[in-house]
Image (cartoon, rainbow, N blue to C red):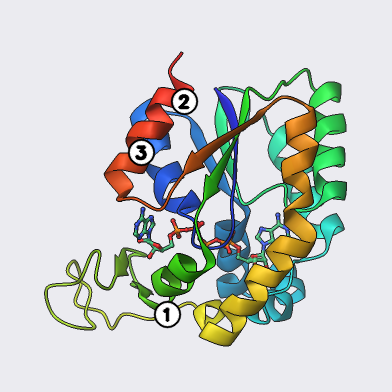
């Protein structure tokens, strides 16, 4: 399967993409994860992307497309994939379409996870992660045994800088302005499949398995 996961920040794209990729063996490619790693390493991409990410703005299209072109030419997408958080603008979606045509790749489905703004603010204000092993926690969904400490290595948990409430509100505005038009783009291509994603993660995962059953 070749999938795109679409949805506002905090809709559960990462959570569900990790589960589906582990279950099915499809590559999980998250542009957000790649960018955060680049920022951590302090490489050129990270230095260029950091301020956009911190402020809840999208990183410029040309930087993202360069990343994706490299992934496609390396053959990483040859055996099925889940694109998580990409494409995110109409130009990205159009350029991806051209790239796929040029490389004989066809998308099977674009999954849109639907969640209300109130639920998103609640989820992201409760999200914590371990800076050592990257394990994710969420109050009250998945709390660590000791408050503020990772269960695996006891490291102090941190929050993503873009999960600050004011930045989350801005990320939602950015989603509505720059990413939501993609929903219509893929609806026209008859690839869009909507999943209500406000319920518990297991229930959303079951809906995903049903949608992608081959
Ligand atoms: P990115 O990392 O892609 O962030 P995002 O799209 O804003 O999404 P999140 O990671 O915040 O949420 P998610 O939908 O993955 O939800 P999750 O599963 O984590 O991008 C970050 C930044 O990078 C962007 O702002 C931009 O600057 C840049 N960027 C990335 N890609 C780009 C691109 N293509 N173009 C330009 N710029 C780009 O879940 C969230 C929380 O909710 C977790 O704590 C989880 O445990 C919890 N949760 C999940 N599911 C449920 C559930 N069913 N019920 C209750 N809680 C749940």
Q: Which residue is mark 2?
A: 211
Q: Which numbered disc, 3 or 1, marks the residue closer to the eye? A: 3
Residue 87 relative to residue 34: left or right: right
Q: If the image is split into quadrants, where does the N terminus sit? A: top right
3 or 2: tag closer to the N-terminus: 3
Q: Which mark is residue 58?
A: none
Q: Secondary structure at mark 2?
A: helix
Q: Residue at x 78, y 17 (%)?
A: 104
Q: Which residue is mark 1?
A: 159
| Cα–Cα gap, marks 3 and 2 | 10 Å
Q: Is residue 104 or residue 40 the one in the foreground? A: 104
Q: Which residue is mark 3?
A: 205
Q: Residue at x 69, y 40 (%)?
A: 71
Binning the other alpha carbons within 10 Å of mark 1 as few (below 14), some (14 to 19) or many (20 upward) gives some
Q: Which numbered disc, 2 or 1, marks the residue closer to the eye? A: 2
Label 2 close to label 1 by CB (< 8 Å): no
Q: Residue at x 83, y 64 (%)?
A: 60
- The image quadrant that residue 174 belongs to is bottom right
Q: Where is residue 14 drawn, in percent x and y?
A: 47, 52
Q: Is mark 2 within 8 Å of ligand 1?
A: no
Label 3 close to label 1 by CB (< 8 Å): no
Q: Is residue 126 placed above or below 6 in the rendered structure?
A: below
Q: Secondary structure at mark 3?
A: helix
| Cα–Cα gap, marks 2 and 1 | 32 Å
């Amino acid at each position: 399967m070749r999938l795109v996961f679409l949805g506002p920040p905090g809709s559960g794209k990462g959570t569900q993409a990790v589960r589906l990729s582990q279950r099915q063996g499809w590559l999980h490619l998250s542009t957000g994860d790649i960018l955060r790693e680049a920022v951590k390493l302090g490489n050129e991409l990270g230095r260029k992307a950091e301020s956009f990410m911190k402020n809840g703005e999208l990183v410029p299209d040309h930087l993202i497309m360069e990343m994706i072109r490299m992934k496609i030419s390396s053959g990483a997408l040859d055996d099925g994939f889940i694109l998580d958080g990409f494409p995110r603008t109409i130009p990205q979606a159009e350029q991806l379409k051209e790239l796929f045509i040029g490389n004989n790749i066809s998308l099977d489905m674009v999954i849109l996870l639907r969640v209300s703004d109130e639920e998103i603010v609640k989820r992201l204000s409760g999200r914590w992660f371990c800076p050592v092993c990257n394990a994710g926690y969420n109050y009250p969904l998945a709390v660590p045994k000791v408050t503020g400490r990772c269960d695996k290595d006891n490291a102090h948990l941190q929050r993503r800088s873009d999960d600050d409430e004011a930045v989350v509100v801005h990320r939602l505005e950015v989603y509505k302005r720059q990413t939501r038009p993609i929903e219509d783009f893929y609806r026209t291509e008859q690839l869009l499949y909507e999943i209500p994603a406000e319920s518990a993660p297991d229930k959303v995962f079951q809906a995903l398995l049903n949608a992608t059953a081959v």
